[in-house]
Image (tube, rainbow, N blue to C red):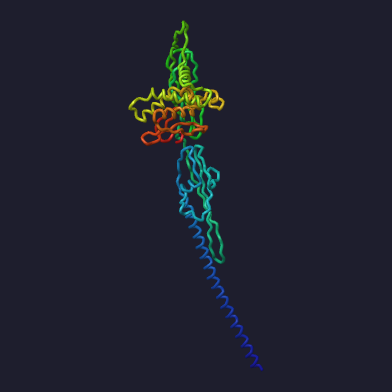
């Protein structure tokens, strides 16, 4: 019995050892597998983080890093910003947020650079990156970069409608009549007149026009006013003055038999006057350019600018008709353009009326040597394919 008990105890002891060994082996295996899994997890995580860093770097490099100087009044669309500052071939699947001077710019919209100085442009890019370590996840990778633009106003105001004037002693004169100052962005500007005219004393007076835009750019132009002694004529024993414009008007009216009370009548008078003027200013052998120049200068030198351009004023003095320019010798830009059209027709020139029927400045174009060039009889411009107001 004692031998049997000893044998049983020995067997039990051997079993315990085997169990302990198995447990030890299992524990070691678990630790090894866990270590391998931990290593593989962190290795994968490290690769994911590295890939995210590379994507962030690529996103930043997508934004071109340079400053720019723009002209005041420039307008850029959303697409123009992207084409200018992003590598557009690399922006697929990227969400873009564009902020210009704290204003978010959306697609199909534009930004007008109407403030001189520094403008901040900020791009924020976002891209989704899908990865899998244990299960699939999506990381939102965001980068931003701020650029600086400088806006400068290098264009001075434009002054039009000024010309040398001649009056007679005792006449009244409005030195600002017909003159306009404008800026391509700011629009019509106030201007100053430097100089005076003594209408009681014959002589020549220099007048200066000064226009300044909102950014301090200044334009100065000059013209002269000649005051002549009053001439008198004797008729039936009495002294008096004669009016050139009145005699011209009466002559045209009586010779044509047309009435000034209707549009058709006034147009008929204007056409007759246009033929008379062309016969006077157009000489044989003149080139088309010389003809156009003669027409432009005739209107520029002989027709005053009508400053009151309301509908009521047009009803009274027909300032938007050719009759006003050719017969009455005072008209708005629309009336001047219609007069130029009649003069060109009479001279055999092809012409166009730009901005006709629009409440804005109007001018003509004439066909010279196969090209349409500008003819602005109010501003005294002949030449160029684009009007300064369109620049």
- Which of the two residues, 26 or 118, is positioned nearer the viewer here? 118
Left or right, 370 with respect to 253, comes to left
Tell me what residue is drawn at x 55 percent, y 46 percent.
104
**Residue 239 appears at what percent x and percent y?**
47, 8
Residue drawn 48% across and 34% down? 355
Q: What is the residue that sits farthest to the bottom in this orientation?
A: 1
What residue appears at the point 45 percent right and 41 percent down from the top-left corner? 69
The residue at the far top in this view is: 237
Q: Quadrant of the C terminus?
A: top left
Residue 20 place in picture, x, y as percent: 59, 80
Q: Nearer the viewer, residue 38 or 198?
A: 198
Depth check, front residue: 148 or 359: 359
Q: Is residue 80 above or below residue 381?
A: below
* Frontmost residue, 224 versus 120: 224
Tell me if residue 303 comes above or below residue 51 in the rendering. above
Residue 80, horizontal then vertical, whole percent: 48, 46
Seen in the picture, residue 52 relative to 176 is either above or below; the reply is below
Q: Which x, y percent locates residue 37?
A: 54, 70
From the image, which quarter does the N terminus lie in?
bottom right
């Amino acid at each position: 019995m004692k031998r049997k008990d000893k044998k049983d105890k020995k067997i039990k002891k051997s079993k315990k050892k085997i169990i302990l060994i198995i447990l030890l082996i299992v524990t070691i295996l678990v630790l090894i597998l866990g270590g391998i899994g931990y290593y593989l997890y962190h290795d994968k995580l490290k690769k994911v983080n590295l890939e995210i860093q590379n994507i962030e770097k690529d996103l930043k490099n997508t934004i071109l890093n340079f400053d720019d100087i723009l002209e005041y009044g420039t307008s850029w669309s959303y697409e123009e910003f992207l084409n200018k500052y992003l590598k557009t071939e690399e922006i697929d699947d990227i969400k873009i947020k564009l902020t210009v001077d704290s204003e978010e710019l959306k697609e199909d919209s534009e930004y007008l650079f109407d403030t001189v100085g520094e403008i901040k442009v900020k791009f924020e890019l976002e891209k989704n990156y899908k990865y899998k370590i244990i299960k699939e996840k999506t990381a939102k990778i965001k980068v931003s970069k701020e650029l600086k633009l400088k806006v400068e106003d290098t264009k001075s105001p434009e002054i039009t409608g000024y010309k040398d004037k001649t009056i007679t002693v005792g006449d009244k004169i409005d030195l600002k009549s017909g003159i306009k100052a404008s800026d391509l962005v700011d629009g019509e500007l106030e201007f100053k007149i430097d100089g005076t005219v003594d209408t009681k004393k014959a002589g020549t007076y220099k007048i200066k026009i000064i226009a300044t835009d909102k950014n301090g750019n200044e334009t100065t132009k000059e013209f002269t006013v000649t005051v002549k002694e009053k001439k008198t004529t004797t008729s039936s024993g009495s002294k008096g003055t004669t009016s050139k414009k009145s005699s011209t008007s009466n002559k045209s009216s009586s010779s044509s038999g047309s009435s000034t009370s209707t549009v058709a009548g006034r147009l008929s008078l204007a056409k007759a006057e246009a033929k008379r003027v062309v016969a006077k200013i157009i000489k044989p052998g003149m080139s088309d350019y010389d003809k156009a120049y003669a027409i432009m200068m005739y209107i520029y030198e002989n027709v005053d600018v009508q400053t009151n351009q309301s509908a009521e004023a047009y009803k009274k003095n027909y300032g938007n008709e050719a009759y006003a320019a050719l017969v009455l010798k005072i008209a708005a830009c629309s009336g001047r353009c219609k007069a130029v059209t009649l003069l060109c027709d009479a001279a055999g020139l092809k012409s166009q009326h730009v901005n006709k029927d629009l409440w804005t400045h109007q001018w003509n174009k004439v066909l010279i040597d196969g090209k349409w060039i500008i003819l602005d009889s109010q501003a005294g411009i002949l030449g160029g394919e684009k009007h300064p107001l369109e620049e």
